[in-house]
Image (cartoon, rainbow, N blue to C red):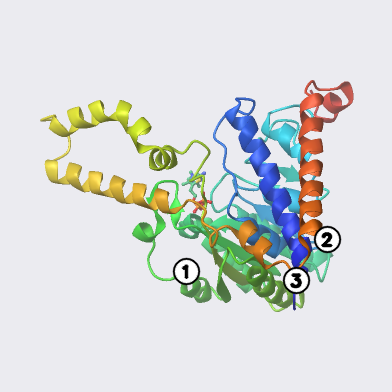
């Protein structure tokens, strides 16, 4: 199997531009609350979801924006939902973490691990009502330590469900290095529950596409669940404005206001023993080092990496990029110009 790399690039670039636009609105204060985006994960999202068609379902986590875009949800409705607007995708009740579209069989949840059971529900419906269709669950490696995800894998095997579990592994769960709280190997853990699979470099979209294609095809043919672990680098950290990332990018400006309290805390006679304080400082320093390294270099940026491999002319590439940028700009303009809820939308939402 070989992907249509130009089409794949178009999809990835669309996700990147939509999420950058959302980030811009968040920095302008037009979107409130924590904002989790999937910048850096486009190769995984597009490489997997490119294989889904009508009747297939997807369960997403707190980084579900790109998944929704890739399933065909109107980006303007997503942007409005992020803004808490009554004419957003979920009437402004869900925000970016709880995007839901019945029409697209796509649901997301901010409860870590919840994509597992939700995808099993979708897969059970697929098995009973829509044979030949599949469900996909997306989650981070932190969710692999959540009981409900393990229970979901267990049932998926016991009931032979057509589901692909996709683990986007960036090695961090908020500020916890996942390796420090994870026993054993994730592939072996899944295999222990009867779910076999593969590991790939998630920055290589074409490779993700190939491997995901095989696993989804297997599930579609009734051969049970599969697990895909795809590594990735996320330049924005856990959420927009992540203090670790800010500190790594401009240490002097960020450390200045924190230095006084840090020194005072270190010299205080009360509190944790000195050895523990020194160990904590060591941990913070190593986390900072990791945050510096998460800057998206060309090898870790799935969008730039695929762009380099395209064999189309530079004119065609520029045209494609202009088109994508125009489409995303129109969607964001549409979301911003209809900022006040109209009556029809208000009644759809029961407001
Ligand atoms: C059940 C549950 N526990 C804790 C949280 C708080 N929380 C939100 S995101 C997150 C980290 C998730 O890490 P990971 O699954 O690796 O996903 P990532 O954010 O790295 O994409 C945690 C602990 C939550 N939302 N739900």
Q: Name the residue under label 3.
A: 3
Is disc 1 placed on a helix, strand or loop?
Answer: helix
Q: Can residue 106 be seen in this view?
A: no
The residue positioned 38% from the left and 52% from the top of the image is: 290
Say whether marks 1 and 3 touch (CB < 8 Å). no
* Whole-percent x, y for residue 62 in the image: 59, 45
Is disc 2 placed on a helix, strand or loop?
Answer: loop
Quadrant (top left, top right, bottom left, bottom right) of the C terminus: top right
**In terms of sequence position, does the residue under pointer 1 or pointer 3 come before the other?**
3
In the foreground, 1 or 272: 1
Q: Mark 2 points at which residue?
A: 55
Q: How far apart are marks 3 and 2 (CA)?
A: 21 Å
* Whole-percent x, y for residue 78 in the image: 73, 39
Crowding at dot 3, Cα within 10 Å, few <14 / some 14-19 / many 20+, comes out as some
Residue depth check, mark 3 versus mark 2: number of the one nearer the observer? 3
**In terms of sequence position, does the residue under pointer 1 or pointer 2 come before the other?**
2
Q: Is residue 256 visible?
A: yes
Is disc 3 placed on a helix, strand or loop?
Answer: loop
Residue 186's disc number? 1
* Whole-percent x, y for residue 36 in the image: 57, 42
Does the closest atom of ligand 1 sit within 8 Å of the Cβ of label 1?
A: no
């Amino acid at each position: 199997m070989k992907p249509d790399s130009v089409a794949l690039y178009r999809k990835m670039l669309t996700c990147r531009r939509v999420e950058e636009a959302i980030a811009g609105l968040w920095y302008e204060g037009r979107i409130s609350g924590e904002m989790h985006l999937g910048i850096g994960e486009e190769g995984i999202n597009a490489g997997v979801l490119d294989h889904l068609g009508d009747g297939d379902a997807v369960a997403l986590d707190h980084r579900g924006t790109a998944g929704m875009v890739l399933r065909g949800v109107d980006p303007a409705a997503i942007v409005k939902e992020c803004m808490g607007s009554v004419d957003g995708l979920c009437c402004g009740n869900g925000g970016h973490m709880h995007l839901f579209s019945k029409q697209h069989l796509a649901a997301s949840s901010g409860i870590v691990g919840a994509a597992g059971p939700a995808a099993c529900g979708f897969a059970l419906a697929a098995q009973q009502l829509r044979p030949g269709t599949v469900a996909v669950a997306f989650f981070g490696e932190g969710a692999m330590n959540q009981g409900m995800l393990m229970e979901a894998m267990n049932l998926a095997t016991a009931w032979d469900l057509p589901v692909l579990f996709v683990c986007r592994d960036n090695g961090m769960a908020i500020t916890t290095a996942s390796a420090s709280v994870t026993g054993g190997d994730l592939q072996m853990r899944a295999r222990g529950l009867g779910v076999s699979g593969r590991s790939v470099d998630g920055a290589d979209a074409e490779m993700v596409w190939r491997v995901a294609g095989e696993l989804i095809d297997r599930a579609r043919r009734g051969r049970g669940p599969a697990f895909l672990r795809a590594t990735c680098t996320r330049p924005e950290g856990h959420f927009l404005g992540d203090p670790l990332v800010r500190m790594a990018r401009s240490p002097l400006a960020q450390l200045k206001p924190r230095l006084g309290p840090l020194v005072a805390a270190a010299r205080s006679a009360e509190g944790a023993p000195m050895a523990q304080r020194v160990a904590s400082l060591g941990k913070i320093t190593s986390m900072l080092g990791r945050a510096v390294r998460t800057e998206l270099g060309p090898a870790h940026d799935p969008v730039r990496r695929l762009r380099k491999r395209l064999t189309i002319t530079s004119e065609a590439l520029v045209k494609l990029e202009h088109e994508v940028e125009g489409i995303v700009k129109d969607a964001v303009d549409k979301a911003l110009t209809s900022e006040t809820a109209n009556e029809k939308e208000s009644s759809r939402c029961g407001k």
